[in-house]
Amino acid sequence: MSKLRLAIVGAGPAGIYAADILLKAEKQFDVSIDLFEQLPAPYGLVRYGVAPDHPRIKGIITALREVLDTGQIRLFGNVLYGRDITLADLKDHYNAVIFSTGAIRDAPLDIPGIDLPGSYGAADFVSWYDGHPDFPREWPLTATSTAVIGNGNVALDVARILAKHADDLLPTEIPANVYEGLKASPVTNVHVFGRRGPMQVKFTPLELRELGELDDVDMVVAEEDFEYDDASKLAIETNKQIMVIDRIFRKWRDEPQTGSSRRLHLHFFAKPLEVVAGPDGSVAAFRYERTEPDGEGGVRGTGEIREVEVQSVYRAVGYFGSPLDGIPFDERRGVIPNREGQVLDDADEPVNGVYATGWIKRGPVGLIGHTKSDAMETVRHVINDQANWWSPEHPEEEAVVELLRSRGVEYTNLDGWHNLDEHEIALGEPEGRARIKVVERDEMVRVSNKS
């Protein structure tokens, strides 16, 4: 009986699901899996992409932890692909590799002024408030009025964190530096702009409803946005999720303003045109064109130009993948070109031994749970491609450990993650919090590797 030595690069949900599915699949060979993660801690997007006030979504970690705690998967954290371990190294130690590195960059928004001081990518802001170790500890929260461009769940997360009072985040795992930054924020108005209508939004009813539950924050919507066309009316009648979203909007439209200290405005039919600079060269306003339904499910411009004074802008128009050394990459879509998870070269031919899953495979679409079915497709090809696996010269499990040690890589392992996990929970206990995240990379490694 042969044995598959498999490397998985990326220890977020996509990578862990792939490992779990492969271990449980029917196959004619044994499996040994090593999971490589550039951060000292696992779980990727669940730890560093989900807002801290969404503990129920973070419950996915429980399921992921159960997979890792079976003892059938080795974790190598704080190992950067392309620097600490290369494609040549993987070929020397494994039969195949699955890349599950996700998408953490902001997708571009090509409008004038988008790069002005005071204009930010939502992905960077999310990484800051989630305590990602590779991002600055401080964030310039000086605006009294700010704009968020986008109509997906990330846009709502960003808007909610900006509008929410910092003290209301204290029961969560929010890092101390993030709490202090948000506590000092002078914001009074947060504006969210979407190009299409309120019945064409990409966020979920749960995310939307949470906005209306913020303490001392008034929801502001414009009645002109709710003159529904036939397509919107049909969507309400035939789609339960859209029906619930409409019900939430109806509630807000009927509620009077209470004079809260902060207001969260939702603007629809607003096509971004320009981030306008002030005399000092930084963000002073957001300019957009009013749109209207085109009768075919889209929108068209009306020629009416509007402008809202803001001092900062966050673009939340999607995430984008990053290229990997030695691996084909689609610069336009921000993904690894592939067919059902089999990585393809420039001639659309499969690259032996190389696979992809998760957002780096299909782009940043779908919820975290969707990565499971995605991983199934990829794993099926790994199993069936046995004839095309690599033939490593050093497949012994200890060989890769010796390689990392010889390069002075201070890697962390699963026991180390347990150390860090327990340490963060202990930091939070005196304050009645779920945990307090350790943010500094060196400190994460130190705590993880304590004896």
Image (cartoon, rainbow, N blue to C red):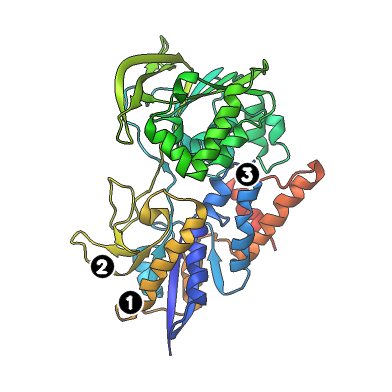
Left or right, 33 with respect to 180, comes to: left
Residue at 68% from the left image edge and 17% from the top image edge = 258
Q: In this view, which residue lies farthest toward the right?
A: 430
Asked if the residue under mark 2 is in contact with the one under mark 1, i.e. CB atoms within 8 Å, the reply is yes
Marks 3 and 2, how far apart at CA: 39 Å
Does dot 1 land on a helix, a strand or a loop? Answer: loop
Q: In this view, which residue lies farthest toward the top?
A: 279
User: Residue 416 placed where, x, y %?
Assistant: 64, 61
Mark closest to the chain's N terminus, 1 or 3: 3
Which residue position holds label 1?
385
Circle 2: is it few (<14), some (14-19), or many (20+) Cα within 10 Å?
some
Does dot 3 land on a helix, a strand or a loop? Answer: loop
Circle 1: is it few (<14), some (14-19), or many (20+) Cα within 10 Å?
some
Left or right, 285 with respect to 63, comes to: left
What amino acid does circle 1 point to? Asp
Which residue position holds label 2?
350
Residue at 38% from the left image edge and 14% from the top image edge = 306
Viewer can see residue 343? yes
Circle 3: is it few (<14), some (14-19), or many (20+) Cα within 10 Å?
few
Viewer can see residue 202? no
Left or right, 225 with respect to 449, comes to: left
What amino acid does circle 3 point to? His
Marks 1 and 3, how far apart at CA: 40 Å
User: Residue 17 placed where, x, y %?
Assistant: 51, 64
Which residue position holds label 3?
54
User: Residue 154 placed where, x, y %?
Assistant: 50, 39
Q: Is residue 235 above or below residue 222?
A: below
What amino acid does circle 2 point to? Pro
